[in-house]
């Protein structure tokens, strides 16, 4: 959680001007729609300096706490929403799939998502910002030996990490490796 806050603070220094507005969960449909829109756009398509402002302001004065798990929508959010609040998609097929897959996941008291592995301990579910570091550390780090993609996936799982696109990401990572 601290790493997300640190990353947010680093990112905020790149803007000349910014404000932080607290929007209660009940009134958060616009932010959810904006987050879904943002996650559907490729990073290469984003023009630097673009500012997006919601048409309806929900500014309230006072102390605001940041829920860093809601700052960025990623693959974990649907499981967290289901496990915390029982929120299911409207589509019955997607709803059934989510319920079946969510049986493998659990949340701790801090809101960290874990996935049960077949023969090992619980694996911490990583978001987009953490996967590259873990891959680099396991592949090239102190104990790394520049292994292939399948071996790298097993090492990541044994190390106690999981994310939904591990196989694809490890293949891409190994393909780009200099050695």
Image (cartoon, helix red, strand yellow):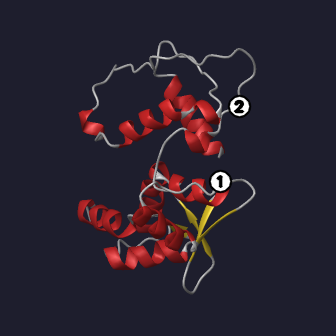
Residue 129 in view in this figure: yes
Q: Residue at x 38, y 79 (%)?
A: 151
Q: Is residue 55 above or below residue 112?
A: above
User: Looking at the image, which is closer to me, 35 or 9?
Assistant: 35
Count the labels in the image: 2
Q: Position of residue 68 (x, y in %)?
A: 61, 40
User: Looking at the image, which is closer to me, 97 or 137?
Assistant: 97
Q: Is residue 91 above or below residue 106?
A: above
Q: Which residue is mark 1?
A: 85
Q: Secondary structure at mark 1?
A: helix
Q: Residues within 10 Å of mark 2 (few under 14, many from 20)?
A: few
Q: Which mark is residue 44?
A: none
**Quadrant in the rendering for residue 80:** bottom right
Cα gap from disc 1 to disc 2, whole angstroms = 20 Å
Q: Residue at x 50, y 17 (%)?
A: 56
Q: Position of residue 96 (x, y in %)?
A: 47, 69
Q: Earlier in the sequence, mark 1 or mark 2?
A: 2
Q: Residue at x 53, y 69 (%)?
A: 99
């Amino acid at each position: 959680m601290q790493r997300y806050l640190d990353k947010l603070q680093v990112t905020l220094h790149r803007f000349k001007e910014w404000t932080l507005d607290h929007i209660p969960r009940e009134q958060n449909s616009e932010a959810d729609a904006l987050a879904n829109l943002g996650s559907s756009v490729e990073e290469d398509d984003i023009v630097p300096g673009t500012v997006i402002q919601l048409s309806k302001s929900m500014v309230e004065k006072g102390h605001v706490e940041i829920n860093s798990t809601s700052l960025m929508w990623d693959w974990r959010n649907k499981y967290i929403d289901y496990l915390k609040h029982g929120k299911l998609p409207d589509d019955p097929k997607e709803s059934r799939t989510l319920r079946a897959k969510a049986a493998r996941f659990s949340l701790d008291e801090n809101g960290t998502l874990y996935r049960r592995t077949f023969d090992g301990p619980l694996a911490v579910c990583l978001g987009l910002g953490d996967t590259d570091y873990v891959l680099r550390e396991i592949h090239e780090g102190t104990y790394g030996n520049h292994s292939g993609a399948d071996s790298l996936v097993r090492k990541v799982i044994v190390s106690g990490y999981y994310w939904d696109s591990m196989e694809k990401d490890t293949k891409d990572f190994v393909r780009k490796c200099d050695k």
